[in-house]
Amino acid sequence: MQFIEKIVDNKTFQWFIIGVILVNAAILGLMTMELTPETHHLLEVLDNTCLVIFCIEIAMKLLVRRLDFFKDGWNVFDLIVVGIALAPATGELSVLRALRVLRLMRLASAIPSMRRVINGMFAAIPGGASVAAVLFVMYYVAAIMGTNFFGKTVPAHFGDLGTTFFTLFKMMTLEGWPDIASDVLEHHPRAWIFFVIFIVFTTFTTLNLLFGIIVDAMEQAKEADARSKMAESGVEITEESNEMRLAIIEGDVKYIRAMLTEMAPGKALQPPAGE
């Protein structure tokens, strides 16, 4: 069992699995092209070989970690993805075989930097949901106003609530919104007020706030990953802020400089305040 554990935790084995994932990605891409039956059969064999390797890897992890295997969400994700690939090729479940391309998502669990990005994205969901709720309220209010203001004169863009929602979405992405505005301004010269306010509050304000939440979550995920590595290395972890840690380091540096410049025979220095 220890031998299997050494293999699973070995960096070379992990890079081998990443290589298999990349090869499998190339195989699945080639299988979408028009190929001869012999070439397609060869690619099927190689694809199944990759699947067997993934199954062996999952089995080895289950043997080593047992129930602890399911405590890691990434292990569960790998198990589900590989399990989908084992679905029968015929019958009602054959549609699941089309989802075997999800095996490529295993790169996210195999590469730490990608895993950190995904963790940051999930960490941003609570704050992002609040921003999304505010954005939806803005959309709903603007959709009702746009339908009432411009629905009769410009039905192609504001004919009903659903059409208005889609028009507002295109405006928020800044894709083709001048054409929409030009069609409306022909009938409503002051409609530019509506467009400017909507774009400012959605594109330039709310979306930037959402991006800020995501960036902050990424930083927190990066810091959590660094703390985890420090804990594994036996480094003491403190809860002070970055500013406090920097202040402590500066105080230590000043004390060392003073000790080096002022040290004299028979003279002892007192440690800085707070030590």
Image (cartoon, rainbow, N blue to C red):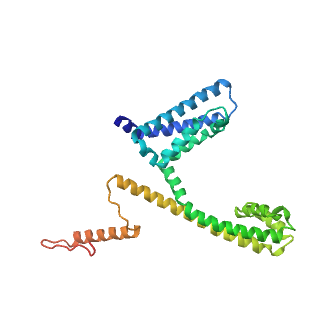
Q: Is residue 240 above or below residue 223?
A: below
Side of 230 relative to 194 (left or right): left
Quadrant in the rendering for residue 65:
top left
The quadrant of the picture occupied by the N terminus is: top left
Where is residue 262 shown, x and y percent of the image?
21, 73
Visible residue check, residue 104: yes
Q: Is residue 140 left or right of residue 267?
A: right
Camera-side residue of 159 and 87? 87
Residue 52 is left or right of residue 183, and the answer is left
Q: Residue at x 77, y 71 (%)?
A: 145
Residue shown at the point (58%, 39%) measured from the top left: 84
In the picture, measured across the screen, residue 266 lies left or right of residue 125, that is left
In depth, the one of 42 and 166 nearer the eye is 166
Q: Is residue 10 visible?
A: no
What residue appears at the point 61 percent right and 36 percent down from the top-left corner? 28
Q: From the top left corner, tell me how far across and down residue 224 is, in percent.
A: 43, 58
Query: Residue extending furthest left?
Result: 266
- The x, y position of residue 69, in whole percent, is 44, 44
**Image quadrant assignment for residue 211:** bottom right
In percent of the image, x 82 and y 67: which residue is there?
A: 182
Question: Which quadrant: the C terminus?
Answer: bottom left
- How far across and down, in percent of the image, does residue 63 sit? 41, 37
Image mark count:
0
